[in-house]
């Protein structure tokens, strides 16, 4: 099975492109919400270009007894900061749009706090049938890159980053 490996440099460029498209599309977020843990590093790089604060949320697919669950569950949420979401323009960031279930869940949770607008940005969207759907209220959806449905290896998952970067040089070609 094909794998896509992206280097930190790839990720940085993709995050820069996302920030540019957010700006050019006329969406001016007040804050970034990062979906942990994959969304943390992309959100931080996007912040370099957009200069907005980051709030982080954690989502898990395990229940309190460490049993797998079908639906996402909050393990960490914004709590008292939730009040500050009202009336704000939020850019929700994650690394990958795979099934879309997590993204749908997070957008729905954010919408409960009556933000002015929610836009979604991911580094990579997998071109596949999605189980989740983004609510109509989402004003913009930006995928840094759209790739075929294959496993992505991110640099932060590498134990040997030099080996990872070497393998990334032989990435399957995209488009
Ligand atoms: P989605 O709604 O954003 O499409 O994500 P989905 O719930 O389908 O993804 C479930 C988990 O699987 C997420 O991680 C997601 O990051 C991870 N995932 C899906 N496809 C890939 C892939 O190709 N490569 C890698 N490395 N991860 C993938 P999570 O359980 O939330 O963990 P975390 O790593 O973000 O902490
Ligand atoms: Mg993730």
Image (cartoon, rainbow, N blue to C red):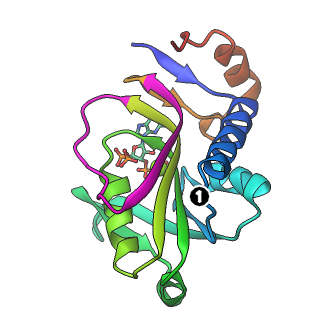
Q: Which residue is mark 1?
A: 27
Residue 142 vs residue 135: left or right? right
Answer whether residue 54 is magenta in the image: no
Q: Which residues are magenta?
A: 127-147
Q: Position of residue 80 (x, y in %)?
A: 51, 90
Residue 161: image x %, image y %? Answer: 73, 30
Q: Position of residue 130 (x, y in %)?
A: 26, 39
Q: Identify the residue at horizontal 59%, vertical 58% (top origin).
A: 27
In the rendered image of this protein, does residue 148 appear above or below residue 99? above
Counting from the top left corner in percent of width and height, residue 29 is at: 61, 65
Write the residue at 41% across / 62% down: 59
In-image side of 29 versus 87 (left or right): right
Whether residue 129 appears in magenta in the rendering, the answer is yes
User: Total of numbered circles in the picture?
Assistant: 1
Q: Nearer the viewer, residue 173 or 160?
A: 173
Seen at 44% across and 13% down, the residue is 2
Q: Quadrant of ligand 1?
A: top left
Q: In the rendered view, tell whether residue 79 sits above or below residue 99.
A: below
Disc 1 crowd rating (10 Å Cα; few below 14, some 14-19, many 20+) is: some
């Amino acid at each position: 099975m094909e794998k896509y490996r992206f280097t930190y440099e790839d990720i940085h460029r993709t995050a820069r492109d996302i920030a540019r498209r957010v700006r050019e599309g006329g969406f001016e977020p007040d804050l970034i919400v990062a979906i942990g843990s994959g969304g943390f590093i992309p959100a931080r790089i996007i912040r370099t270009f957009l200069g907005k604060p980051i709030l982080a949320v954690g989502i898990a697919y395990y229940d309190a007894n460490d049993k797998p669950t079908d639906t996402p569950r909050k393990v960490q949420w914004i709590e008292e900061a939730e009040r500050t979401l009202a009336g704000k323009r939020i850019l929700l960031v994650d690394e990958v749009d795979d099934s879309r279930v997590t993204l749908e869940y997070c957008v729905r949770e954010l919408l409960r706090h009556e933000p002015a607008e929610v836009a979604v940005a991911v580094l990579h969207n997998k071109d596949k049938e999605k189980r989740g759907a983004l609510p109509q209220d989402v004003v913009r959806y930006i995928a840094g890159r759209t790739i075929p449905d294959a496993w992505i290896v991110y640099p932060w998952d590498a134990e040997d980053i030099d080996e990872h970067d070497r393998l990334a040089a032989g990435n399957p070609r995209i488009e």
